Each structure stands twice: as C-alpha cells, then as structure tokens.
Image (cartoon, grey):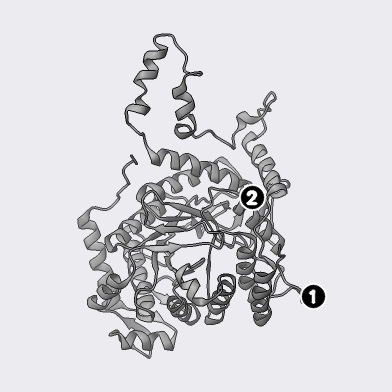
Amino acid sequence: MTIATMSVLTEKDIDKVHEASLRILADVGVKVESTAVRKTLKDAGARLNEEKEFVYLDESMVDRSIESAPKKVRICSRGGRDFVIPGEGVQIISTDGQPPAVFDAETGEKRASTLQDLKEMMILADALPEVGYIWPTVIANDMPTDRSSFYEFLTAIAYSSKHIQHGACSVEEANFQIDVCSAILGSKEKLKERPIFSDVSTPISPLRYDAGEADAIGVLARAGVPVVHLSMAIAGVVTPASVAGSLAIINAENLFGMTISQTASEGAPSIYSSFSGVMDLKSGVFLCGTPEGILMDSAAIQMAKRYGVPTCAGGPSNAARSLSSEAAAEGALTTMASLLAGADMMVGLGGVDRAGMISKEKMVMDCEAWRWLLRVREGIQINDSTLGVDAIARQGPGGSFLSDIHTAKHLRKEFMIPQVTAYHAKRIPDRGEDELLTYAKARVKELLATHKPPLFDAETASKVGQVAEKYGILLKDGSQIFEHA
C-alpha cells in the first residue's frame, strides 16, 4: 500500500486558477514570434494581433486541446527500459541538465565543462539504476558554441541506453534529433511507436515564445515525440510576487504550449511541467529549494492532474555553491515534495548552485536519497506474512530473529540497506572529514572504471554517423564524437 499524496490546493482553488489562466489566454494573450505557428493557431480558431504578434485563445479552443492531449505517454529507451506515465507506482527521475560548469570534488573548484565531462557523466548516469531517464548533464564548452546542443544530444544517446530528454531551439535541431533516433530504431515510424527521446520546450516568461522553439514544437508533435511544456516562473520578476499569481501564468503557459502541440498534430504526447521559484530582490539571485518554489511546483502538479495529463517537476533543487549540508537539506525537501505531490517525472540529480553546475559525487548521493524516498513512498505492507505472528511465536520472549526463516524471506523486500553512507568506512572516523563525500568519490571512480557503456553496434554507428556528418556534428579532425562496439 502506498502512502497518500500531498495536496496544496483545494478543488475550489484549482477552479480559480483555471479560470484565471483562461482570462489570461483570452484577454492578455501570448506573444508568438513564429509566423507559421501563429497561422496554424489562427486556422484552429485563435484570434491574432499581427502587429504585436499576440495570440489569444478562447475557452473552447483550450478545452479541445486538453481533450485531445493523451492521458498517458510512453517514455522509451534504446536499451528497452520503457515506462508509461502516469502509471501505478511509476515515478522516475533524471539528472540535472546543461549548466556550463562542473564541480571538481578533488579541488573543490568550479570549472567550465567539456565534452569529456559529458561523456563521463552519461556513463555514470547509465550505471546508476536509480536514474530513470537522462538530461544531457552539462554544456560542452569546447565544442562550437552555436552547435554545442547538437553535440550534447548525440553524446548522451551514444553513451547511455536510457531515455534522453533534451531541448530543440530550432526546426533544424528538432530534425537532427529525430533523424538520429530514427537511424537508431530503423525508421521514423518506429520512433513514433517507441519515442526514445523527448524534448523540453520552455516559453520565455511571461507569456512569450521565440520563433525557433515554437516551430520546433510542431515538428516534434508531428513526429510523435513527447514535448514537456516547461514553465519557469521567477516570482517577483517575470511572474507576480505571489505564489497564486505565478501559478496562474505557469498554468496559462502550459495550456498554451499544449495547444501548440495539439493544433500541430492532434493527439501529440504532451507533458505539463513547472520548475519555478523566487528572486531574492536584494541580490537579484534566483533561489532554488525555497518553500515558494515547492508550492508552485506542487500546485502545478495538481493542475496537471485536473487536466489528466502527465507531469514533470523539479527534484533535488538547491542554491548551495558546494557539496554542503545546504545542498543536502534543500535537495531532500524539494524532491520529497515533488514525489508526494505525485509528479510522474522529476529532474535534478547531481545539480548544485541553482542548477548552475553538476557534481558526479552529488549525483551518487542524490540517487541514494531517491532510493530512501521511494522506500518511504512504498509505505507498509500489512498482511499475515509481514505481520509474522508465527515467527514471533517461534522465537518467543527473548528470542532472536536473525536465523528465522521469516527474516530470510522478508529481509531484501523490507529493508532499503544504504549504499552510500559513512558507516562503510572500516576505520576510526576523522571527525573533520565528510565521510559521505569520501564514499561518493570512491563510488564514482568505481562505476566509471567498471561500467561498460552500451555503445552502438557497427551498423547503427554507421547510420548515426551519416546523420552526424549531414549536420556537421563532428570533431575538428572530421572524426565522429562517439565510439562504437
């Protein structure tokens, strides 16, 4: 039996937010910089102000989009580990994605990330069973700036067998991703049947879409690729200085994104999402891991459930600038909130400093916390076997259950034995040492040394290589950026 989920809105609250979002979409509008998308929306019934590039949606158009959006979405992978969301007991989490820096635990320094860092993190994420799907973790700063996102996508899917979730800022980038994955699976039809990647589409809050990202949504929708419509409210700056006002924009942006998808291709897989927070108006710093951010994301999950669509939310968000207790505390609280609120997908393993850098060691520690939280979510199984009255009778007062058959039967199912923890050290502790970090460092080295990434076979590598050559995603010497088996 699983534990109950968390609610932060009443049914009346949900209705009020929905009504406010409808007023925003009908009266305030959304700026769409793509001529093609504006035309598609107009043909579907939207009103336009062409001079301002504003699009207005009435309630009936929004209702049609909600109705046509699939209530379940397939999250597949080239390795065969597939999920359907929402699904009973299915909640999956990914790495954090695409900051320009890594945290070097050996030196304690932050440095610019490279393509090699990305390869290593993809191998590590592939090795960690808790990672359900993967965001390419860092920017490859040593690759061409205007194409680095292409390199990151190709590296991620070449060095991990798990579902890849990325982003497409143009029609060309969306087509590149579709072509790569179609080459892996054999055809675009097979990709539509088993989407091994999904993309995140983020409007520029408040209420604006640039041309490239808006156009890419349509390409992805027609290809059957799931699109995560991600709103990133920053309360007090790009959304009102209130949780409720920010939520109204989060919801309006999600409904609008869903409408772009559904008008491009009815039935296109869409996922509702919010990774939001507040601005520290004293310093101008965006804060992660705050109570208000938790409330916004948790409320957004409830709004998505009102519409019956899958959800994605933040995971271990934090504003810590190092692997400190702040990172642990904020990360645990934000992840637990998203889990209990019922998010289908979560993001953030390994993220530090407001998602501004990634740490391999924190990825390992976050996975341990995720295992802990999943065990809590499972709750307590109450039945004749688990109650163990027969075992209690066998042992009686003063007995020991170490050798009882009941222990052998239930031990592995009942106990989540910690893997990353200080007690593993077989020596007198150094009170000035962070033993958890020491163990995490050792675990990272072990996994990178022993895990064999699921490389493409020669035939698949050849097909994917042709796509890479077509788009110019090669190393400076003209060679491929990935190896093959």
Q: CA distance from mark 1 to mark 2?
A: 29 Å
Q: Find residue 50 and report its image quarter.
A: bottom left
In the rendering, which numbered label is found on residue 477? Answer: 1
Q: Residues within 10 Å of mark 2 (few under 14, many from 20)?
A: many
Residue at 26% x, 75% y is: 64
Residue 212 rendering spot, x and y as whole percentages:
50, 80
Residue 347 rendering spot, x and y as whole percentages:
49, 56
Return the residue found at the far left: 12
Kindly tell me whether residue 108 is visible in this rendering.
no
1 horizontally vs 58: left or right = right
In the rendering, which numbered label is found on residue 194? Answer: none
Residue at 25% x, 59% y is: 14
Residue 114 rendering spot, x and y as whole percentages:
70, 63
Label 1 or label 2, whichever comes before in sequence order: 2
Q: Name which residue type carries label 2.
A: Lys
Return the residue found at the far bottom: 51
- For the N terminus, give its image quadrant: top left
Q: Is residue 407 above or below residue 79?
A: above
Q: Find residue 47 and report its image quarter.
A: bottom left
384 horizontally vs 332: left or right = left
Determine the secondary structure under disc 2: helix
| Foreground of the two, 89 or 137 | 89
Circle count: 2
Q: Residues within 10 Å of mark 1 (few under 14, many from 20)?
A: few
Q: Which residue is mark 2?
A: 360
Q: Nearer the viewer, mark 1 or mark 2?
A: 1
- For the C terminus, give its image quadrant: bottom right
305 horizontally vs 463: left or right = left
Q: Is residue 316 above or below residue 285?
A: above
Q: Report if the CB atoms under discs 1 and 2 are less than 8 Å apart.
A: no
Residue at 64% x, 73% y is: 464
Q: Name which residue type carries label 1.
A: Asp
